[in-house]
Amino acid sequence: MNLGIDSKSLGKKIEKIPQRYVLIVMVVLVMIVVGLLYYFIMIPQLETKARVAKEAADLRAEVEKLKAIKRDIVKHRQEYAKMQETMQEVLRQLPETKDIPNLLRSVTMVSEESRLKVKQFEPKLVKSKDFYSELPFEMKFQGNFRNLASFLDGVRKQERIISISDFVFEAKGLPNNVIVEGTCEANAYMYLREGAKKPAAAPPKGAPKANEPAKK
């Protein structure tokens, strides 16, 4: 059985086909080839490009997030450093102990500089507040008005906070040499750390003491 194709006869048959049909067939073949190329080559490349673009955008977003975190860390460190400085300043003004000797030394130094004589310095009971305690004390002093004003100004400029109130004084002497004698109450302050125990309140009068049976 002969399956050979006669090229001459095939060529003659093709020549007999109208030109417009040949053009249509060629256009269809070209479209098929272009479609196959687009489907098998262009579409995978476009998908790869879109995936790479998305990954790049995600990486840029992650980098920006890391930069923002770094900026926040630097900002928080600066804020923490400022808080530490503020805390140290507060601790200088509000020590954590009574420190009576240094307090007396400071008051004595100011009194010597102002030439006001402090005749008595008597600490009182400590009064606990929310986050600080008051250390009240009473002073008796003697000097002229200029000495007293200089003393108050010196106390105001002290690193440790000291407030003075409740003045009671009397002017003595001649008009050209007036001497002021009096007393005043003052408060120094102590910082209380969180969890510090406040002094227990005194039991009411008549209450039985520890290990003592109640009176019937």
Image (cartoon, rainbow, N blue to C red):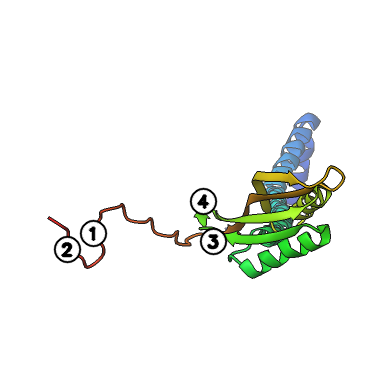
Q: Residues within 10 Å of mark 1 (few under 14, many from 20)?
A: few
Which label lies toward us, 4 or 3? 4
Q: Residues within 10 Å of mark 3 (few under 14, many from 20)?
A: few
Callout 1 amino acid: Pro
Residue at point 51% right, 59% down? 194
The quadrant holding residue 120 is bottom right
Callout 2 amino acid: Pro
Q: Secondary structure at mark 2?
A: loop
Q: Badge 1 is on which residue?
A: 208
Q: Badge 2 is on which residue?
A: 213
Residue contact between numbered discs 2 and 3, judged by CB atoms under 8 Å: no
Q: Badge 3 is on which residue?
A: 193
Residue contact between numbered discs 1 and 2, judged by CB atoms under 8 Å: yes
Q: Badge 4 is on which residue?
A: 129
Callout 4 amino acid: Lys
In the displayed structure, would residue 15 be above or below residue 160? above
Residue 61 in the image, given as x and y percentages of width and height: 70, 51
Q: Kindly report the distance in space between the C-alpha atoms of the residues bearing marks 4 and 1.
A: 28 Å
**Left or right: residue 96 compared with residue 9:** left
Q: Nearer the viewer, residue 40 or 53?
A: 53
Of the two numbered discs 1 and 2 on the same chain, state the one appearing first in sequence: 1
